Amino acid sequence: MNVLDTLARPVRDLRISVTDRCNFRCSYCMPKSVFGRDYAFLPRAELLTFEEIDRVARAFARAGATKLRLTGGEPLLRRGIEDLVAMLAEIERIDLTLTTNAALLADRAEALKSAGLDRLNVSLDSLNDRTFRSMNDVDFPVDRVLEGIGAATAVGFAPIKINMVVKRGVNDGDVVEMAQRFRGSGHIVRFIEFMDVGTTNGWRLDDVVPAREIVELISAAHPLEPIDPAYRGEVAQRWRYQDGSGEVGVISSVTQPFCGDCTRARVSADGKIFTCLFSATGHDIRSLLREGADDEALDMALTSIWQKRNDQYSELRSAATSSTAKVEMSYIGG
Ligand code: SAM
Ligand code: SF4
Ligand code: SF4
């Protein structure tokens, strides 16, 4: 079944947040000033159970989703995540990915691989230890992330996508070094424009380094040429090194929005469906599950939500950050 929204976009890519907690406090995502000691994270009973996540994922797969990403918060903080991976890996025709800050990856990579995880995305904002420690704001050393990437490579994850959020005046000087470090490794670095998600990260357009500028920076050192997207709705624009030493991606969600092809749905850790990263409210699916809805009722609810979808925030956003209420990234995942 292929469900289409009001702009004829199918649902292809589902991102499920398995926890709203994190062991980092990246300033652009969970600034300490807001996510401090007293911050009220979701109580355990509010989180979808693994069985509930599995039912939601299967319903989305029936509606046409072919990609499933586990995210957060930090997904490796969710106890027993490997068991969830094993359940979801059983869903037919689903490509299963997990996005992590890799702080806990070195010890977990093997278990995730054997549970059936297809792919890994690792977030890494700088190779400069000082910059990295300050960006994660918990003084976490870059070497431990690199160890995690090494362990994941050793158990056969390839290519790993390494995501770097680029912020003007903070880590834009590290772009070329990051490209160079993974050039020829088989892994793919993706440079992400700093986005105005949520309302707590103090976003300003001046902080955004346009994807075009990032490509020019790298290309000046190692010439790049564009390659076609792998599929409709791919978020990253792909570029390959002319000398054949691999590829990089840029995600230009601010300067060149791609809502027209947006096939993504997100589910928060407490079971709300968000049809856009910038939605203010989600659709509660957990109540339905806990009231004993069967698969048919679940499918109907999903279809009705998706068929009403008309989101295109990035194409409509104004130059200044909007003051409207928006959901936080750590709650619904990137
Ligand atoms: N904790 C995991 C991690 O960092 O990989 C998974 C969740 S995190 C919210 C997912 C992705 O969102 C990360 O790659 C992060 O860099 C990105 N992200 C968070 N806030 C962002 C922002 N304001 N603009 C662009 N990307 C952002
Ligand atoms: Fe945590 Fe990921 Fe957000 Fe950083 S980007 S605070 S690692 S959830
Ligand atoms: Fe999709 Fe919303 Fe982002 Fe547009 S702004 S690409 S609709 S998530």
Image: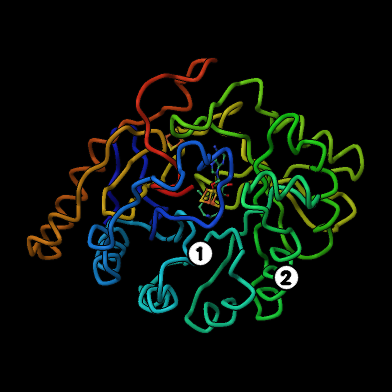
Relative to 158, say whether 173 is above or below. Answer: above
Which residue is located at x 34 percent, y 37 percent?
8
Q: Which of 52 and 4 is in front in this view?
A: 52
User: Of callouts 2 and 1, which one flags the residue occurring earlier in the amino acid sequence?
Assistant: 1
Name the residue type under label 2: Glu
From the image, state whether disc 2 or disc 1 is nearer to you: 2
- Count of labels in the image: 2
Residue denoted by label 2: 147
Residue denoted by label 1: 97
Is label 2 in contact with label 1 (beta carbons under 8 Å)?
no
* Disc 2 crowd, CA 10 A, few/some/many (<14, 14-19, 20+): some
Residue 178 picture location, percent across and down: 80, 50
Q: Nearer the viewer, residue 19 or 287?
A: 19
Residue 293 picture location, percent across and down: 9, 62
Which residue is located at x 56 percent, y 53 percent?
24
Q: Describe the element under mark 1 as helix, strand or loop.
A: strand
Name the residue type under label 1: Thr
Residue 248 picture location, percent across and down: 73, 50
Q: Quadrant where the N terminus lies?
A: bottom left
Label 2 – label 1 distance at C-alpha: 19 Å
Left or right: 139 as drawn, with respect to 253: right
Residue 107 picture location, percent across and down: 60, 78
Colour theme: rainbow
